[in-house]
Image: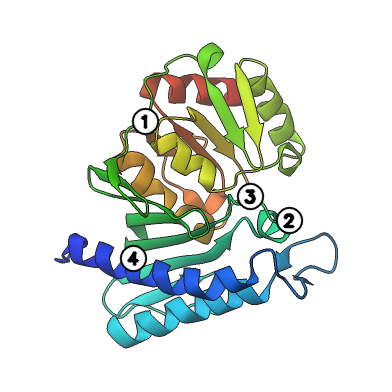
Amino acid sequence: MSERDLQEELAFAHQLADAAGAAILPHFRNLSGVENKLDIGFDPVTIADRAAETAMRERIIAHRPQDGILGEEFPSIASRNGWSWTLDPIDGTRGFIAGTPVWCVLIALTFEDRPVLGMVSQPYIKERFTGFGDLAELSTHSRKSRLQVSTVDDLSSAIMATTDPHLFEGGEAIQFARLREKIRLTRYGMDAYAYALLAAGGIDLVVETGLGLHDLHALVPVVRAAGGTITDWSGGDDYQKGQLIAAATPALHQQAMKRLAG
């Protein structure tokens, strides 16, 4: 990996999150309209999504002109140095338009398409979960604290989260149901915020499917830096599949994979 000062890049990620939050918050619980990206189904996008991604892109182009950009709302820009920024301006747009405060801005720095640094920012409640290497931190308006996953190592004691059980279809729905029946408590509707809570020790397991790279790149460094395990459903790093398991402990991760595999 070519040299990069990740503390400096973290400071830049905070600048990106500041810009995104400033673009989003005037529209939260004050939307004039919602567009649907799909002809069949519902994939919402708002003026806030586009304004936030634009604000972040402008700063990357101005201050990191050699870096690539992979965003949700606009075409990608190829990297000229191996480094790229992955942006999801509002992860959880459905929650955003409903007025719930668990949507997030996701920012990741990748090198040769592998996530190196991640940030999960919630501007409304002023929380930022960050991670790179073995440094994981929660920043609020008043303090900073170390992130550390829980020690739960058995499915029967675990709190699991997923965004929506109806996102699992066909064989995946059967696999997820097989896992859920062994779980102590399952919660829904938090999108990327669930992974942040896993890094903070509140949630023990997150299992999802249908994710894009903009949904997951930021999550990987945060969970791993907090001591957790995060992989695809096979235990690898093939994020193109869109399947993700994040667990507080290796034992819990292995049990979840076993249940999903049948």
Badge 4 local density, few (<14 within 10 Å), some, or many (20+)? some
Q: Amino acid at mark 1?
A: Val
Secondary structure of the residue carrying tag 3 is loop
Q: Which residue is mark 3?
A: 210
Marker disc for residue 149: 1
- The CA distance from mark 3 to mark 1 is 25 Å
Task: Say above or below: 179 vs 102.
Answer: above
Amino acid beneath label 2: Ala
Q: Position of residue 56 (x, y in %)?
A: 44, 76
Inspect this view and state whether residue 232 appears: no
Q: Secondary structure at mark 2?
A: helix
Q: Position of residue 127 (x, y in %)?
A: 43, 52
Quick one: label 1 or label 2, which is nearer the N terminus?
Answer: 2
Q: How far apart are the alpha carbons under marks 3 and 4?
A: 28 Å
Task: Give the numbered dot on residue 98.
Answer: 2
Alpha-carbon span between mark 2 and mark 3 = 21 Å
- First in residue order: circle 2 vs circle 3: 2
What is the quadrant of residue 50 in the picture? bottom right
The answer to the question of whether label 3 and label 4 lie on touching residues, with beta carbons closer than 8 A, is no
Marker disc for residue 119: none
**Label 1, residues with CA under 10 Å away: few <14, some 14-19, many ≥20:** many
State yes or no: discs 4 and 2 in contact (Cβ < 8 Å). Answer: no
- Alpha-carbon distance for marks 4 and 2? 26 Å
Which amino acid, by three-letter code, is at mark 3?
Gly
Viewer-side label of 1, 2:
2
Could you tell which of marks 3 and 4 lies nearer the N-terminus? 4
- Vertical position of residue 231 compared to residue 251: above or below: below
Q: Nearer the viewer, residue 260 or 247?
A: 247
Dot label at residue 14: 4
- Mark with earlier residue (1, 4): 4
**Distance from label 1 to label 2 (Cα)?**
29 Å
- Residue drawn at x 77%, y 37% as measured from the top left: 170
